[in-house]
Amino acid sequence: MTVVRMSSSIINKTMGSFFRVFQLKNYSCIVVLYLIGTCSPVVSWSTTTTTTTTTVFSPHYHRCCVSLNSNRNSNANSNTNSNTKTNANASNNNDMLTSHNENDIVPTLLMTTMERRSAMKTAMSSSLSIVAAFTAASPAFGVTQEEVASFTITTAPTPTSITNTNTLPTATKIPSWTLPGNVRMPVMALNTAGLTLVETERALTLSVKNGITHVDFHPGRERDGVAKFLERQDVTRVGPPRSELFLTTKINMASKGTSPADAKDMVRDQIEEDLSILNVKFVDMLMLRDHPDAKVLQSQWSALEDALAKGQTRSIGVINFCQFSLTSVLATAKVTPAVNYYLTHVGMGLDPRGLRSFGEARGIRTFAYGALGEPGPNKELLQNPIVNKIAKEHGVSPEAVAVRWILQSGAAVSVRPTVEFGLGSATCLPKTEENKNKQTRSKCDQGLAERAASFQWELTTAEMSELSGLTSPNDNPTLFSSAGCPDAFGPKDYMKYIQSLGS
């Protein structure tokens, strides 16, 4: 942690105009700037020598806190006790900083979410810049050289890790695959299926904050929520740039009886529409849905190959393709699908219905959804005694074990923010009114933090074997496919499901 300190005389002479609103009688002003990095930089100005600086450690937010601590009716000991208590509570506080006595005034401002390495460099360079600027400008402000000499930069220890599920540490950087064309695809994605426009925007904001920069969304309201997020990013410049986001979206299924030529035109029209609404020149992955007509699949796949050649997408893949669908596309494909996106979870084994080995033998990687079950959370899976035993041993939830199993098996995974989802519906709600003042995170934020933390621990070889050996619940990996694949969800129900996502 980098701490920059100035004497009260420097503050009064050089920064009075900026903080005059805070310089009240018998009050001291502390400005704490906390940016997460390899070490935790903090810039601190104090206008008195008697006030103990309160540094707020939060592993989840980058924030600026302005605290006016009253010295009335208190002494050094009471200040110390108050601040100690505040620090103890602050490690669990992920919302606005709360006042620690009735005389405190504690306005807070959320800061720009910055990439960790960038934050470190910014904080260190800013510290040095502050020193240089004050040294050069000191005569103009009437600051003496002795006062300038008291302006120092010191290093303090980083905050300790927090293991409580409400205050999970900032996620480590999500690993990536290198797809054809040297495209880097993060192996964990936010699954927005069933979220509203507003909830999609909220989920993506929380997802990025927790380190998940890959978003997997449907056309319609989910796409529109992603568009709102991107629009806000362009205006505020808050969060990672577009180049650090990975956008994965899906081509709508052609209805029964659509000709191959019309199906191809539908793909082209949808791509143009999606890019226009998202206001981007390209997405990072376009995925084609299954269809019972091989000719339609081949025609639509050629449209995706055209989009790849034109730079409208950086990679192309398929969704819910069984062996029949894969064989149909590969018969005429110029470009092999980079991934096959299908249902996979504990209880289905490492090679459900032979689909994974079939695809990977042809260079098609597995991108899994449904780690917790589909179309809703699977109680049999999440209440399985072996899953819960392993979860207890690692101090995580059953959901975390289910996600970690997929990742450790070598597949990529698209994760639901919470277990509150069903057919065509999901939630990513803000904190409830009664919980707004409590030191907890929303379920959506907490769930995404736990998903991202999947890369911070591992299952043992024995645990992987136990989980891989489970034979129930044994679902169909291409459940949401067309009638061209066995045991499909059903064309009519499937179309209703897709239409519900676009409403």
Image (spheres, helix red, strand yellow):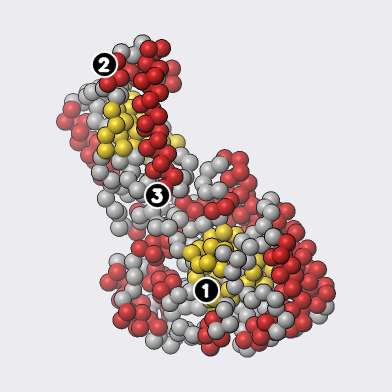
In depth, the one of 208 and 257 nearer the eye is 208
In depth, the one of 138 and 114 nearer the eye is 138
Q: In which quarter of the image is the N terminus?
A: top left
Q: Which amino acid does label 1 sit on?
A: Ala
- Which image quarter: residue 400? bottom left
Task: For mark 1, give the secondary structure.
Answer: strand
| Position of residue 252 measured from the top left corner of the image (x, y, whole percent) | 71, 69
Task: For mark 3, give the secondary structure.
Answer: loop
Question: As drawn, which residue projects farthest toward the left?
Answer: 77
Residue located at (54% from left, 62% from top) = 184
Foreground mark, 2 or 1, reads 2
Q: Residues within 10 Å of mark 2 (few under 14, many from 20)?
A: few
Placement of 5 over or under 85, stated as above or below: above
Q: Which of marks 1 and 3 is nearer the N terminus?
A: 3
| Position of residue 50 measured from the top left corner of the image (x, y, whole percent) | 22, 24
Q: Which of marks 2 and 1 is nearer the N terminus?
A: 2
- Disc 2 from disc 1: Cα separation: 63 Å
Q: Which amino acid does label 3 sit on?
A: His
Q: Earlier in the sequence, mark 3 or mark 2?
A: 3
- Disc 3 from disc 2: Cα separation: 39 Å
Q: Which amino acid does label 2 sit on?
A: Glu
| Position of residue 329 measured from the top left corner of the image (x, y, whole percent) | 69, 81
Q: Residues within 10 Å of mark 1 (few under 14, many from 20)?
A: many
Residue located at (45% from left, 75% from top) = 410
Residue identifier under label 2: 146
Residue identifier under label 3: 60
Residue identifier under label 1: 368
- Disc 1 from disc 3: Cα separation: 27 Å
Instruction: From the viewer's perspective, tell me whether residue 494 is left or right of residue 49.
Output: right
